Image (spheres, helix red, strand yellow):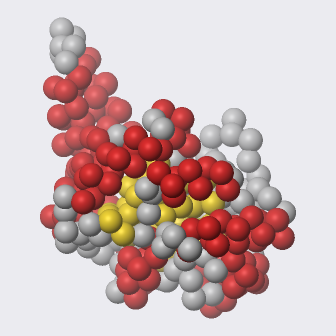
Amino acid sequence: MLAGIKEMSIRAAEENRIVPGFNVFGYEDAKVVIDVARELGAPAILMSNKDAVHHMPLKISAGIYRALAEEVDIPVAIHLDHGKDFDLCKEAIDAGYTSVMFDGSQLPFEENIQRTAEIVDYAHERGISVEAEIGAVGYADPSVNYVPVYTEPGQAKEFAEKTKVDALAVAVGTLHRMTAQSAKLQYYLLDEIEAATKVPLVIHGSTGLPDEDLEKLRSYHIGKMNIGTALRMVFGRTLKNFLNDNPSEFDRLKAYQPAMTATRKVVMDKYKRLGW
Ligand code: G3H
Ligand code: ZN
């Protein structure tokens, strides 16, 4: 069934669990995520990032993901990840996404508040949840032009109060697109942010978190954890190996099978470590 990220994040944080939000790029990985969630009786979050939006119009992806969600009896959020402006967030909401993230992390503090609040107004009037970012989670890839900055707890409190966001992405030591699980989480900072705001927190760049951290973070007030690169790696590498091992094969549907099976293992492992 369709759901937003708000209720599932609040509930997970209260139950010492975290809902993994997976970046997906079409039917194959979305189906794997929903199948695993259904098996575990867990909620699912299917997220479209900017690469996905560039590849497939939001109307089309909304149609695929909504059809998958409507077939199952677990809550499934269809989420725009890192929406860059009001127009894109509006387009996602109007296309049928059930929640959006507005990423104003590179804007001055006051402007981030103001632009986030505008999107929250539009979204909440339509029953749609909003996530936004305070501080800035950087990128492991140095070619990405982006200024990372740790979240300041006082700003997190003010931002959450003034914008009324449903979930708050914070920068506490992770980086996007890490290919090894070697991020060093700043627990002291997470403790201070948690003491400053009651809004469920979101950790981005979670591919880079070691397994022990995934398990440890369950007891924090985190509702959602974004995982992208881990799935892209396993899907892409399995696809590549299959085609290398079977050079006369040209049927992509055959190549998808081992890629989906391998992706399923990673999705299941992440869910279990996050308390499901
Ligand atoms: O918003 C998406 C995530 O933060 C994914 O990050 O690809 O490093 O796991 P990741
Ligand atoms: Zn992110």
For the point 41% across and 79% down, the residue is 7
Q: Nearer the viewer, residue 150 or 109?
A: 109
Q: Is residue 2 left or right of residue 198?
A: left
Q: Is residue 31 left or right of residue 124?
A: left
Identify the image quadrant of the N terminus.
bottom left
Q: In the rendering, at what x and y percent does residue 142 appear?
A: 69, 39
Q: In the rendering, at what x and y percent does residue 5 appear?
A: 44, 70
Q: Is residue 172 visible?
A: no
Would you identify the image quadrant in which residue 241 lies?
top left
In the rendered image of this protein, does residue 27 appear above or below residue 8?
Answer: above
Query: Disc count in the image?
Result: 0
In the rendered image of this protein, does residue 164 appear above or below residue 79?
Answer: below
Q: Nearer the viewer, residue 86 or 194?
A: 86
For the point 46% across and 76% down, the residue is 6
Would you identify the image quadrant in which residue 42 lies?
bottom left
Q: In the rendering, at what x and y percent does residue 191 appear?
A: 60, 85
Would you identify the image quadrant in which residue 153 lies?
bottom right
In the rendered image of this protein, does residue 157 appear above or below residue 251?
Answer: below
Q: Is residue 253 left or right of residue 153?
A: left
Q: Is residue 148 visible?
A: yes
For the point 48% across and 38% down, the residue is 57
For the point 61% across and 50% down, the residue is 88
Identify the image quadrant of the C terminus.
bottom left
